């Protein structure tokens, strides 16, 4: 994992532009290139597909895409940085979707990959989603949260104690929550 570095000082517009470019790159790779490879391998192996109404897959994909884009733009504007570790936010972000779940972008990305699996009836995409969850939760999350704790101290520790990583809160985090 590359070292975490705070984003250089820039305008909100520049942070948003960097975030959207990063999003385009990562979505192309993780939601385009890799799934195409998985689907090709499944086809070569003769794995059967399952059927799910495509409208469900489309709705999941669109909702997760909106969550990912919203979270990224909020991080760019409010956090004064990007989701990329090499341009980490300058401020702790605890508004918008972050009031309900600690890493809405990870949830969104896994949800998008799941939607692709539903669209194609792909068992391999399920394996991809589970692998992505295990890698993110078991390796990336620890590094990211260690960096956030180092940079934001008690504010992040309080946030982490009150907002779950994978299960959304019913009520928004307000910073002074007791539970």
Image (cartoon, helix red, strand yellow):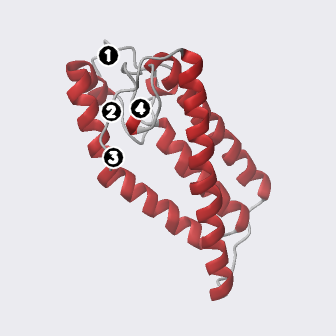
Report, in whole angstroms, how far the alpha carbon at label 4 lies from the one at label 3.
Answer: 11 Å
Q: Which mark is residue 177?
A: 1
Q: Secondary structure at mark 2?
A: loop
Q: Which residue is mark 2?
A: 5
Locate residue 175, reporting x and y percent.
34, 14
Of pointers 4 and 3, the one earlier in the residue sequence: 3
Helix, strand or loop under label 3? loop
User: Percent x, y for residue 152?
Assistant: 26, 22
Q: Callout 4: helix, strand or loop?
A: helix
Which residue does the numbered mark 3 point to in the structure image? 2
Cβ–Cβ under 8 Å for marks 4 and 2: yes
Task: Say above or below: 44 vs 73.
Answer: below
**Percent from the top left, x then y, of residue 75?**
49, 25
Q: Residue at x 38, y 51 (%)?
A: 136
**Which one is nearer the viewer's eye here, 124 or 144?**
144
Residue 102 visible within the image: no
């Amino acid at each position: 994992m590359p070292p975490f570095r705070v984003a250089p000082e820039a305008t909100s517009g520049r942070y948003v532009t960097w975030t959207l470019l990063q999003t385009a790159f990562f979505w192309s790779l993780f939601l385009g290139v890799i799934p195409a490879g998985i689907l090709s391998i499944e086809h070569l192996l003769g794995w059967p597909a399952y059927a799910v109404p495509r409208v469900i897959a489309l709705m999941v994909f669109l909702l997760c895409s909106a969550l990912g884009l919203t979270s990224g733009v909020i991080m760019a504007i409010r956090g004064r940085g990007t989701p990329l570790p090499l341009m980490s936010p300058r401020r702790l972000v605890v508004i918008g979707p972050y009031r309900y779940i600690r890493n809405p972008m990870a949830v969104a990305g896994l949800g998008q990959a799941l939607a692709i699996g539903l669209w194609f009836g792909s068992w391999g995409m399920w394996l991809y989603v589970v692998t992505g969850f295990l890698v993110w939760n078991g390796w990336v999350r620890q590094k990211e949260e260690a960096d956030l704790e180092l940079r934001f101290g008690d504010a992040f520790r309080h946030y982490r104690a009150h907002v779950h990583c994978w299960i959304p809160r019913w009520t928004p985090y307000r910073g002074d929550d007791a539970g």
